[in-house]
Image (cartoon, rainbow, N blue to C red):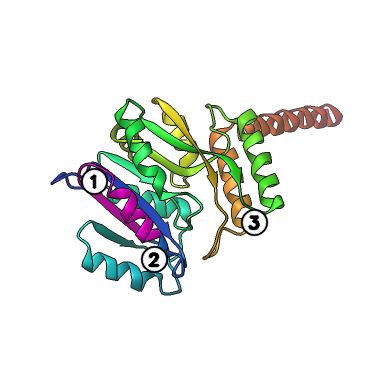
Amino acid sequence: MSGPPDQRERPVLSVVVPVLDEEKGLPELHRRLGEALAEVQGQVELIYVDDGSTDGSARLLEGWTRSEDRVTLVQLSRNFGMEVAMSAGIDHARGQHVVLMHADLQDPPELVPQMLELARGGADVVFARRIGREESAIKRALATAFYGVMGRLARVPYQGQAGDFRLMSEPVVEAIRQMPERRRFLRGMVAWVGFRQVPIEYRRAGRTSGRGASYPQLFRLALEAIASFSDVPLSVASYLGLLTATLSAFGAALLA
C-alpha cells in the first residue's frame, strides 16, 4: 500500500470500489457511477482496486484509466480479500470524503450524492442501512444472526444491517489510516473511531453477475470481527486461565 496521498488539486469526493471478477457487471456499474457522480459539485475521483481478478476486469479498468482522468486503478499482485482491497483504495484516496462500495451493484451508486449531502450537513460517517435484502433465505438468516451477535458482543455501538457501503469524512479516513491493525475489519474500525455517524436507508438488490464471498470466507470474516471488536477472546482467555490455575492447584494438592 502507498503512503499518504498527495494533496494537489484535492477532489471533494473519492469513490473506492474493490473489484474481483466483475467483468460482466462493470460496464453497468461504471455507467451508473458516472451518472451519479455528475450530480456532485466539485472534482471527484473514482478508484478501482483490482483484487487479483482472473477474468477481463483488469482490461476494462485499464481502458477507463487511460480514457478518463478521474479514474485510478490500483492493481494488487494477487487476491488479498475485500478488506485489504478497500484499505489499499483508502490509502490512495485524495478526496475530502471517501465512499466505499462494492462492484456488484447490490449497493446503488445513486445514493452517493445523497450521502455527500448528509456529510456536508455535519455527518462524519454516512452508513447505508439495509431495510431489505434480495438474497437467499440462508444468507439473510446468517446476516441477521451475525448482526444480532455483534450487537450484543461488540465493545462499541455496531450498526446492524449495514455493510461496507458508507461515506467517511477526512478525519475518519485519517483515523483509519493511523490504526495499526494488520488483519482489518473496516466496518468495526469505522464504528470504533467514533465521530458523528448517521444512516441512510435503502433496499439491497440481488447480485446479477460476478462472484460473491463464499460461506467459508464470510465465516472467517465473522470470526475476525468478533475477535477484533468484542471481549469474547479476552473472556475465553480468562476462563481458560482460571481453569488451568484450578487444575494446577488441584494437581498440586494431590501430589503434595
- Identify which residue is drawn at 45% across, 49% down: 108
Q: Which residue position is annotated with label 3?
A: 215
Q: Which residue position is annotated with label 1?
A: 94
- Identify which residue is drawn at 58% across, 34% down: 160
Mark 1: which amino acid?
A: Arg
C-alpha distance separating marks 3 and 2: 27 Å
Q: Is residue 179 visible?
A: no
Q: Is residue 161 above or below residue 33?
A: above
Mark number, residue 249 = none
Magenta stretch holds residue 23: no
Depth check: give the residue in front, 53 or 141. 141
Instruction: List x then y, in percent, for residue 197.
Output: 43, 28
Depth check: give the residue in front, 103 or 249. 103
Mark 2: which amino acid?
A: Pro
- Identify which residue is drawn at 40% across, 51% down: 86
Q: Residues within 10 Å of mark 1 (few under 14, many from 20)?
A: many
In this rendering, position of residue 5 left or right of residue 237: left
Instruction: List x then y, in percent, for residue 168.
Output: 36, 37
Q: Pointers 3 and 2 in contact (CB under 8 A)?
A: no
In this rendering, position of residue 40 left or right of residue 82: left
* Mark sitting earlier along the chain (1/2): 2
Q: Give the structural element (helix, strand or loop) at label 1.
A: loop
Instruction: List x then y, in percent, for residue 27.
Output: 39, 66
Of circles 1 and 2, the one toward us is 2
| Region in magenta | 29-48
Mark 3: which amino acid?
A: Tyr
Q: Which residue position is annotated with label 2?
A: 27
